[in-house]
Amino acid sequence: MLRFIFNSLLAFLVLGMVVVVILSAYVVPQLPNIDTLSDVRMQVPLRIYSKDLSLIAEFGEKRRRPVKIEEVNPLLIKAFLAAEDDRFYIHPGVDWQGLVRAAYSLLKTGSKKQGGSTITMQVARNFFLGREKTYLRKLNEIFLSLKIERELSKDEILELYLNKIYLGQRAYGVAAAAYVYYGTDINSLSLPQVAMIAGLPKAPSTTNPIINPERAINRRNYVLERMLILDFITKQEYEEAKAMPSSASLHSAFIEVEAPYVAEMVRNDLVSEQGEEVYNTGLIVTTTIRNNNQKAANLAIRNTLLEYDARHGYRGPEHSIGSDANPDEQSKIELLDSFSAVANLYPALVTKVNEQSIYAYLTGIGEVEIDWEGLKWARRYISENRRGDEPKNANEILSKGDVIRLKETKEGKWRLTQIPEVEGALVSLTPETGALLALVGGFDFYKNKFNRATQARRQPGSGFKPFIYSAGLAAGKTAASVINDAPIVFDDLGIEDEWRPENYSKKSYGPTRLREALTKSRNLVSIRLLHEIGIPFALEHVKKFGFDTSRLAGNLSLALGSAELTPWELIRGYSVFANGGYLIEPYYVDEIKTYMDEYIFEHKPLTMCDTCNEIDTTSTAPEETANEENIRGLDEFESKITTEDVQQAITEDLTSEAEEPFNAPRVVDARNIWIMNSITRDVIKLGTGRRALSLGRNDLSGKTGTTNDLHDAWFSGFNSKVVTVCWVGFDDYTPLGRGINGAETGASAALPMWIDYMKIALDGMPEAIMNRPEGLVNVRINPTTGNLSSASDPNAIFEVFRSENVPEQSQDEGSNAILLQDTQSDNEPSQLF
């Protein structure tokens, strides 16, 4: 009998060995190449950051945040080992003890249940195999696991596992799970939280703490018990952790800076270049956006549009359930949930109306009071030019059951408000390089994704005049040139019928110097100036500022800003004034990396160099410049990101000898720019931009813009470090009308936005005016004639001229003037006495 048993066992052993050899000969050659595990590319979402490395947006289906094994909390590793594979650091990739247990379970129950899988086997399955439960798949898994263990270290295998494993709620990997469930990083997790996450791989979709908290806690407690058995935690730690309730809640990506319009610009560019794959390749895009600037821009545009809206009256509640309705709290919550939050305006249900106050219910807060200070503004809207009488009590404004919008004030009180119908845009950048500092394309991206900063073509009105006046200087005019501000009628072939332009004030002022005309935004002088220098010459000069002249009016209406431009196009033109005459290309992508910190792209900064660029007086702004490859920071991308591409980029861009910097082309003479900037500083000191004096600075230049019938309001302004363009208007071209303080012009509707933003953008920044170039002189002139004045003239004023354009002295003004060449500093300009 013993011999029979021995022979039988020997036969089974030999047969088993033969089977193993045969299967090995069949299975092993078909195993996949695991070299890819050494350079695995996880499906990681696209993430977009500000220049200050704050998250702006995350795009992608899988919420994965890869981490290195050394970055993982050892307690978390122990929890996974306890839950999934406590012999991981002992077995060779296959735990034979586990397989025996699984085989015994199969024989006992007669059903195939997945069991005995090690962490290495799960890596093999997750990266190379499907999840079907077949004997052949299990066999492939075993052989592949043995192969993986020969190729990779235990820590490398565990790192792959912790980053790849699905943990429910679109969270792939432990770092993503820590954030999705607890809103924190993996090293800030408590013991109960660690155990909860470690318990998720068994049934991540049905046993996670969001879907089924009870089952999730039971699984968590099992993991804690296993950790206790393995001496990973003490008895006291086990008891305390087991007694803790679940603290999990669903967390979306934590957006640190609100810049959705910028994020969409980046996303759209990348998808256009790379297709849908960019959502999974783990690109990390760092933009040029600055946190403080973007936050200031968001606040400035919202406050400006809300203030405009309040000046024109209250349009009434968004909805009403009737004054007889008495919903319970759950019904109130469900009702208000049907009204999405827009910007910082929250839906609320009016529950009580007193004589000069109301009470309203806010989800998550409860009932709040709105006093008369927060209500009395709400005169009834009639039209953009008319409002109803001032209300005397609250029931003239609202009724119980109305659904309204509330906004919290700085003082912590609540104020009645409404979603503005008017829209706006703000763009701000660094004129020296074109780096975008802030961009807002509308009141709220999620209300309307149309980006008015880059997509809305609107007439800039008088905001275009500085480019025409610069053309005038280029044609030989001076800031003191006198043009008659008088009515004029043109039979312009480019304009239908007769054209009778007029000043905004409906008045004319006679002979006017160009400085005064631009400061006061005189339309008639601007038209006569353009007529004198000629439209073709003006278009050639304007092209130097980067404008597409094929889209500009080929008639005298060009002087009044009749062309349709986006704020993005206009700010490029104003940047030439701000940086001293150089044409830059606005950009918003600073660098692009993979999630493994490998560089794909780095923006090459421009250099402003007076000696490197001689102005081309015969040609206009070039179609292609040395900086062409930097446009929007994306053109270096290949059609598909691969390891080879990354290595090539690293080799070419990072390890090669430093290339010579790109030089921005000088397109306008520095003296022309300096004179124009001195005139536009007067716009703020003496003209339509006087409100900006509230900033208390002397280095600000700018120009208001208002179009016919008040369809558009603009303010474009700058110093040498920051240039900003603001626009306000209706998408359907409804006139802005008249508010409490008169017509809604660029000075009243758009300039407040610019001031609010620049107050923050320039905070702590020294005053910055471009250096005064050589070849300029300051002389005394007669303010009426623009000619040189004698030293004894009590009405004489100073004006700056290019040395070759100093005007002649009138016969009756004497000949005792002395010309001093410009050899002094900016603070001590040369003068003619």
Image (cartoon, helix red, strand yellow):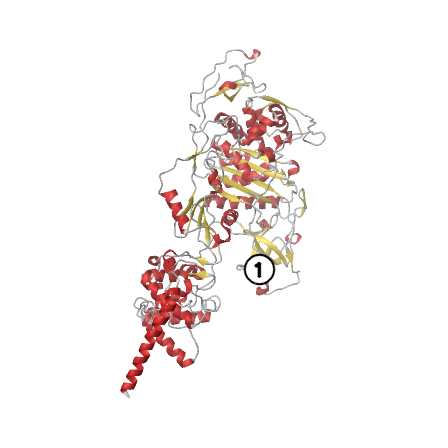
Picture coordinates of residue 350, whole percent (x, y): 61, 58
Disc 1 marks which amino acid? Asp
Picture coordinates of residue 130, whole percent (x, y): 44, 66
Picture coordinates of residue 800, whole percent (x, y): 50, 22
Viewer can see residue 242 = no
Picture coordinates of residue 268, whole percent (x, y): 52, 48
User: Within the image, what quadrant is residue 358 found in?
Assistant: bottom right
Decide which of 754, 49 is in the foreground and name it.
49
Figure disc tally: 1
Decide which of 398, 756 is in the foreground and name it.
756
User: Within the image, what quadrant is residue 243 found in?
Assistant: bottom left
Residue at coordinates 65% horizontally, 60% vertically from top-left? 321
Residue 136, placed above or below residue 180: below
Q: Where is the N terminus found, in terms of image quarters? A: bottom left
Q: What element carries label 1?
A: helix
Viewer can see residue 422 = yes
Label 1 neighbour load within 10 Å: few <14, some 14-19, many 20+ = few
Q: Which residue lies furthest to the left in this view?
A: 3
Residue 493, placed above or below residue 225: above
Q: Residue furthest bottom?
A: 1
Decide which of 34, 269 is in the foreground and name it.
34
Decide which of 739, 291 is in the foreground and name it.
291
- Judging by the rendered image, the residue that carries numbered circle 1 is 337
Residue at coordinates 56% horizontally, 47% vertically from top-left? 443
Residue 525, placed above or below residue 141: above
